[in-house]
Image (tube, grey):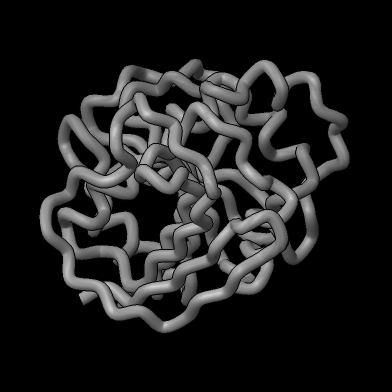
Amino acid sequence: MRPHVVAQVAVSLDGVASGFDVDLARFYALATLWQEDVTLIGADTVLAEETAVRAAPRRGPRAGGPLLAVVDSRARIQAWDSLRELGYWSDVLALYADQTPARPPEATTRELVTGYDQVDLAEVLDALGRSGVELVRVDSGGALVNALLELGLIDELALLVHPILVGTGPNWCDAGQVELRLVGTEVFAGGVVWLRYCVG
């Protein structure tokens, strides 16, 4: 059985996911409510923060923490050891495809290979479910969330809407029409609104 998949996205009032100051403290405080088994992110999200990841203190893997799984079809991530040692996750898992470029022979990062030229996200979730994973939280940009929505693989969508109009930049969602059912709303100081939806 596939795990329950929650996508958490911080957006502006006009639907843009970048170009404004995200309330990160609120975002990650809310993230702890799910107590996920796996945090799923895309390579672009890691690469955008790679310099900060390498410079961050290495507190070591977090015993009992979630597994960090990174979709990296082109093997662009190099900072696996730094990610593992950040202190947020118990371990890291590289999600590759058959045609992913060869990794260095000394690489020690755990791998899951699915799909031909792109990672097969449905197969990834199936494999995680077989291993006992019950809840996956997607903490990534629009590309991964959109891919999962298009495949019907997201069960719950949580939007942290910030009271700002960015005016430029791509909309976070271009997955086409998706039916949503509102299951929760909360308003925080400063006008930040948390909206939770069931998908489908």
Q: Does residue 186 lie above or below 100 as drawn?
A: below
- Residue sitting nearer the eye, 49 or 103: 49
- The reply, left or right, for residue 3 in relation to residue 143 is right
Coordinates of residue 22 in the picture (x, y in percent): 61, 41
Coordinates of residue 143 in the picture (x, y in percent): 30, 38
Residue drawn at (44%, 31%), measured in percent from left and top?
Answer: 166
Count every numbered label the image shows and give the total: 0
Q: Does residue 179 lie above or below 102 as drawn?
A: below
Q: Which residue is farthest left?
A: 177
Coordinates of residue 198 in the picture (x, y in percent): 33, 77
- Residue sitting nearer the eye, 160 or 98: 160
Quarter holding the C terminus is bottom left
Residue drawn at (26%, 41%), measured in percent from left and top?
Answer: 119
Q: Does residue 158 lie above or below 197 as drawn?
A: above
Residue 3 can be seen in this image: no
Coordinates of residue 20 in the picture (x, y in percent): 55, 32
Quarter holding the N terminus is bottom left
Residue 150 can be seen in this image: yes
- Residue sitting nearer the eye, 65 or 17: 17
Q: Which residue is farthest bottom?
A: 183
Residue drawn at (71%, 61%), measured in percent from left and top?
Answer: 189
Residue drawn at (69%, 30%), measured in percent from left and top?
Answer: 81
